[in-house]
Image: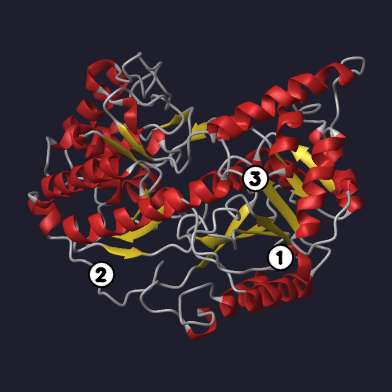
Amino acid sequence: MSGSLNSSSLARLLGEWNFGAAPAYRELADVVRLLVLDGRVPLDVALPSERALAATLGISRTTVTAAYSLLREQGFLSSGQGSRGRTCIPQASPRGTGNGGANLSGAPGLAVPDGILDLAYASLPASGEVVHRAFASALTELPALLPGFGYDALGVNPLREAIASHYAAAGVPTTAEQILVTSGAQHALNVVLRTLAGRADKVLVEHPSYPNAIDAIRAAGCRLVPVAMPAAHAPAPSAAPSGGRPGWDLAAIETALTQQRPAMAYVVPDFHNPTGRLMSDAQRRRLVRAAAAAGTVLVVDETLRELNLDGAASTPVAAFSPAVVSIGSLSKSHWAGLRTGWIRADESLIQRFAAARTTMDLGGPVVEQLAAAHLVNALSEPLPARLATLRDNRDTLLELIAGHLPDWQSERPDGGLSVWCRLPAPISTALAVVAPDYGIRLAAGPRFGTGGAFEHFLRVPFTLPPEQLETAVLALRAAQDKLATSPQLRRNVPAPPDAAIA
């Protein structure tokens, strides 16, 4: 992608960048670097001129010049004519640090150096023995497939049948013809977007939502229609399922569907990322009806469905309508390295997805699919032990946050891999900037939304063992204490306790 960013747009993304914890030019460079690393400022985009940015921010041109110079030294800004360098990513050194002291540990997608705890990703290591055994079995089955070409846009039949049987067992009658195997859930979403949503089409999303989904929708040229999730501490009447726990604001979703008429809606009803909420069956039924009335294709991401920490019952959304498109994956339940996902939909849609898929790739790796078939057929085998560990980790993290960060408000997740925390001040990006200095890597809250929202929020995964979670929370406290010494930060007045999530 190429283009330019004007000074007003960059200033909006920067937000409260000058915290006084370091020289102004360094703080400006640090926040711009984070914006590039987490995707809020795209690559190969020309930054505003030094003069224009200085005028917009109300600072000296010398400060901007020094910040741009530091970004060039660190490899995040190309050398260009005058001051219009373009954003870029440097080559990471083995230790994860670039020139001029740039710490790449804050960059999603880059290797984490030794000594840095990764809280940017919510992923687990492989369920080792189970995955190993599946691959061993796959290798014995491979010779039977070697006479073929090895290309299959739909996926190998044993895996498609296994996935179909899994849906049928969950109460959603499904045939192999209704399954398309993909290289993970992200690949599945890209296939769906290419098929169902053209450039400038509207796509409804929850707000907050999964960052990579937001990125994919934007990359497809679609227009986001964000609908706010109700605040954890003050659920709207239409948003609270039985038991009074916060859910989804169905009234707001219905209004958006009726007024905006999006081509597609992307939702995560099963342990929503990042809040960990579980949508009730009543809400699912209402959502399906609203999407159908608006002529919107409902796309449901079920990647986290198996990580049901409290054993709550729910019905797959596809059980309420044959028009629902479901996306699944083994990345969260078993291992992201498998790169195996799928789409479940009406057979005619699957054929359209397959045609769109061939413009992107010609099929997935066969051995991985054969192994995945074994894992899906015995899906529950590694889960009891994994869920028990995750429950302990979740409880440990919540206790640590309550003990060491008492001014944070943490929402207890029903499932998934992370806790969504409300911070005492809009410091999420600032925390992500300084976090590597304290041995942790974070994904700033605005990565989960649009328009710079969620500076008051941070997602904290509980995928690390308890002793590392304690180290991470102590590091978060130290980073927050560092920011709290800034006069500029002290002037930030926290939002009132009953403020809704933007």
Cα distance between the residues tagged 1 and 2: 35 Å
Cα distance between the residues tagged 3 and 1: 27 Å
Q: Report crowding for label 2: few under 14, some 14 to 19, many 20 or more residues within 10 A (C-alpha).
A: few
Q: Quadrant of residue 28?
A: top left
Please determine whether, in this image, residue 411 is positioned above or below residue 488.
below
Q: Residue at x 17, y 55 (%)?
A: 404
**Badge number at residue 495:** 2
- Front in this rendered view, residue 107 or 150: 150
Nearest to N terminus: mark 1 or mark 2: 1
Kindly identify which residue carries mark 3. Answer: 221
Viewport quadrant of the N terminus: top right
The amino acid beneath tag 2 is Ala
- Front in this rendered view, residue 297 or 270: 270
Q: Quadrant of residue 366?
A: top right
Please determine whether, in this image, residue 399 is positioned above or below residue 190.
below
* Residue 425, image x, y percentages: 22, 60
